[in-house]
């Protein structure tokens, strides 16, 4: 008995029993812990993966307040294994709850929080609760199965150990050792435990299976890790591209806003007389900004489309010359209801509107974006951006900016048109005022200056510093002439006398001849001597008599004139009043009449 107690078989049996029991328990604990952690990880991963996959839909539905879709999405999440509760709360007060209430102190749940974001702004929080009680229950079931399985295996091993230990243990352990020695955590090439080791379901077989399973899990984890790294790199590259695209859009938007501000300021300060030069420079800047090959401003006048401005990146760009609006009726109809029209491929017009397609292709255009320039609903012209060798790179951002550029251009062209019309009105007004001025200062019958400019000129002479003379002329017996021949003939005599005085060549340059009454004329002469004044008066009197206009009511039997005049010396004229000078000249005229008419009476400085 003592020999048996100290025998290798007995000690091996006891040792194996003890070690087997220990390792059985240890194996169960390891497997239980592993299963627990694996269950936690799997449940957490499933919840996280599913939650993240529906977050964009939840964000869109929450933003649109689509409760029906939100309920369906949350119900699907709540039906997942191990999920005990689902709670959704938005920043504006919208809340939805499924399952058990969520409390911070509830130890039966593990909570996962996910931020709900829409358009890069957090609009709510999604909270998912993991039922730890259910997880523990499943683990207890697994524990019972593990205990029963390992217990039976242990008893079977004890029963067979004495007969199989020498045949199975050593060789199989050696094979396991060889398998373990082949494991390399850096390469993790595909390895398998020899079939002889795992053929029998004993401890060594289980250890072999566990080792094989562990090795497979390591390989799976490594593969998953590499896949996650690749996915992360792809997401990083996508994010970098997105950031780059967004940066380019923001930079373009910044340049567009800056150019719009510059052009708006330039429009405010632009001289409309140099409008075409400014439009050419503005067209170039717009073409560079929008990355097009042509920018043109067309005007519709009298049913024809004419270029107001054209910028082209390619040399020898063709212009549309005198195109009839009838050839672009489809576009004109669309612009009646729309402000902007984008055609990314002119080929789409080929069957719809052959005329417009032909017009566009005749100047090489393959894509166009055009904005209507209108005034009170009337189509005045177009601002067009076009390409000739490639499709039009267009988006909503450019659509909005082109609308703003075209609106500013529309205001400028309307202002230029209003200024042009105003200038025309001003010129017409100046012309009318000039005509009214002439009419106001001209005698309607004779065409001579009337009394108003005569008095202004005489007043200026009296205030000046040059010698001058004043002559008053009166047609002799003019009332008798009207009574004898009629007023129409009298008017004819006045015209002939005025023409004779004006075109006689006697009056010096600068002399003012005016009709100041019915048959009375006056002449203001500057820079004359007393002798010149008298000679001029006598020549004028003789010139009228030489007309030989019959006058039966006059003793001379023809039309004659009487002339009275005064000479204004330089030393006395500045103190004279116009009324006094006119009165004195009139007195001289009456003296001439008293002397028998057809006579001249001139006084030299009567105030000296």
Image (cartoon, helix red, strand yellow):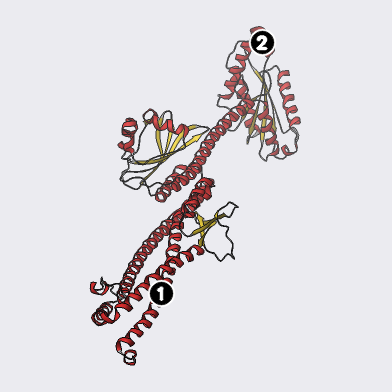
The residue that appears at 43% across and 72% down in the rendered structure is 33
Above or below, 529 relative to 190: above
Observer-nearest residue: 485 or 213? Answer: 213
Which residue is denoted by mark 1 in the rendering? Answer: 30
Q: Residue 369: which disc? A: none
Observer-nearest residue: 403 or 571? Answer: 403
Image x and y of residue 511, in percent: 61, 31
SS at mark 2 in the image? helix
Q: Distance of mark 1 from mark 2, alpha carbons?
A: 147 Å
Mark 1, residues whose alpha carbon is within 10 Å: few (<14), some, or many (≥20)? few
Above or below, 160 relative to 111: below
In the picture provided, is 171 more to the left or to the right than 147?
left
Q: Is residue 502 visible?
A: yes
In the picture provided, is 307 more to the left or to the right than 599?
left
Q: Residue 482: which disc? A: 2
Image x and y of residue 468, in percent: 66, 34
Q: Is residue 256 visible?
A: no
In the picture provided, is 533 more to the left or to the right than 237?
right
User: Which is nearer the N-term, disc 1 or disc 2?
Assistant: 1
Q: Quadrant of the N terminus?
A: bottom left
Q: Quadrant of the C terminus?
A: top right
Residue 204: image quadrant is bottom left
């Amino acid at each position: 008995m003592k020999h048996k107690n100290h025998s290798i078989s007995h000690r091996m049996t006891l040792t194996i029993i003890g070690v087997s029991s220990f390792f059985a328990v240890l194996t169960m604990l390891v497997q239980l812990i592993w299963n627990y952690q694996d269950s936690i990880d799997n449940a957490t991963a499933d919840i996280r993966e599913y939650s993240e996959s529906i977050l964009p839909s939840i964000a869109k539905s929450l933003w649109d307040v689509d409760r029906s879709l939100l309920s369906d999405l949350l119900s699907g999440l709540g039906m997942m294994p191990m999920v005990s509760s689902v709670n959704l709360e938005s920043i504006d007060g919208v809340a939805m709850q499924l399952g058990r209430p969520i409390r911070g102190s509830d130890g039966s749940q593990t909570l996962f929080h996910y931020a709900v974001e829409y358009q890069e702004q957090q609009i709510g929080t999604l909270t998912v609760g993991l039922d730890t009680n259910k997880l523990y229950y499943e683990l207890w079931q697994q524990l019972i199965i593990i205990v029963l399985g390992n217990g039976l295996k242990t008893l079977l091993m004890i029963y067979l150990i004495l007969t199989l230990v020498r045949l199975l243990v050593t060789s199989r352990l050696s094979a396991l050792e060889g398998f373990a020695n082949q494991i390399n955590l850096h390469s993790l090439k595909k390895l398998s435990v020899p079939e002889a080791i795992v053929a029998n379901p004993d401890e060594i077989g289980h250890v072999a299976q566990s080792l094989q399973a562990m090795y497979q899990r390591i390989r799976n984890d490594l593969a998953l890790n590499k896949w996650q790294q690749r996915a992360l790199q792809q997401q990083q590259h996508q994010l970098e591209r997105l950031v780059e695209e967004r940066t380019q859009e923001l930079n373009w938007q910044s340049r567009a806003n800056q150019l719009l501000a510059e052009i708006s300021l330039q429009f405010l300060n632009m001289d409309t007389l140099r409008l075409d030069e400014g439009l050419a420079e503005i067209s170039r800047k717009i073409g560079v900004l929008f990355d097009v090959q042509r920018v043109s401003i067309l005007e519709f006048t009298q049913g024809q489309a004419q270029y107001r401005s054209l910028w082209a990146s390619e040399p020898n760009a063709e212009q549309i010359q005198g195109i009839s609006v009838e050839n672009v009726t489809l576009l004109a109809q669309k612009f009646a209801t729309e402000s902007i029209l984008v055609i990314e491929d002119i080929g789409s017009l080929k069957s719809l509107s052959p005329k417009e397609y032909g017009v566009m292709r005749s100047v090489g255009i393959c894509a166009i974006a055009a904005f209507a320039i209108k005034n009170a609903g009337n189509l005045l012209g177009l601002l067009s951006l076009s390409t000739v060798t490639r499709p039009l790179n267009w988006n909503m951002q450019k659509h909005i900016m082109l609308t703003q550029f075209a609106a500013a251009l529309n205001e400028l062209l309307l202002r230029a048109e209003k200024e042009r019309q105003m200038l025309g009105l001003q010129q017409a007004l100046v012309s009318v005022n000039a005509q009214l001025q002439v009419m106001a200062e001209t005698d309607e019958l004779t065409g001579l200056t009337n009394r108003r400019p005569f008095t202004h000129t005489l007043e200026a002479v009296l205030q000046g510093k040059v010698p001058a003379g004043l002559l008053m002329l009166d047609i002799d017996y003019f009332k008798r002439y009207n009574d004898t021949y009629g007023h129409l003939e009298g008017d004819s005599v006045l015209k002939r006398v005025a023409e004779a005085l004006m075109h006689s060549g006697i009056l010096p340059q600068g002399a003012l001849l005016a009709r100041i009454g019915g048959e009375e004329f006056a002449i203001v002469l500057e820079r004359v001597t007393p002798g010149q004044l008298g000679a001029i008066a006598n020549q004028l009197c003789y010139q009228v008599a030489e007309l030989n206009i019959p006058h039966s009511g006059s003793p001379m039997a023809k039309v004659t004139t009487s002339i009275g005049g005064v000479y204004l010396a330089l030393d006395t004229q500045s103190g004279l009043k116009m009324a006094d000078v006119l009165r004195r000249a009139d007195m001289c005229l009456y003296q001439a009449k008293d002397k028998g008419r057809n006579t001249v009476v001139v006084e030299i400085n009567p105030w000296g």
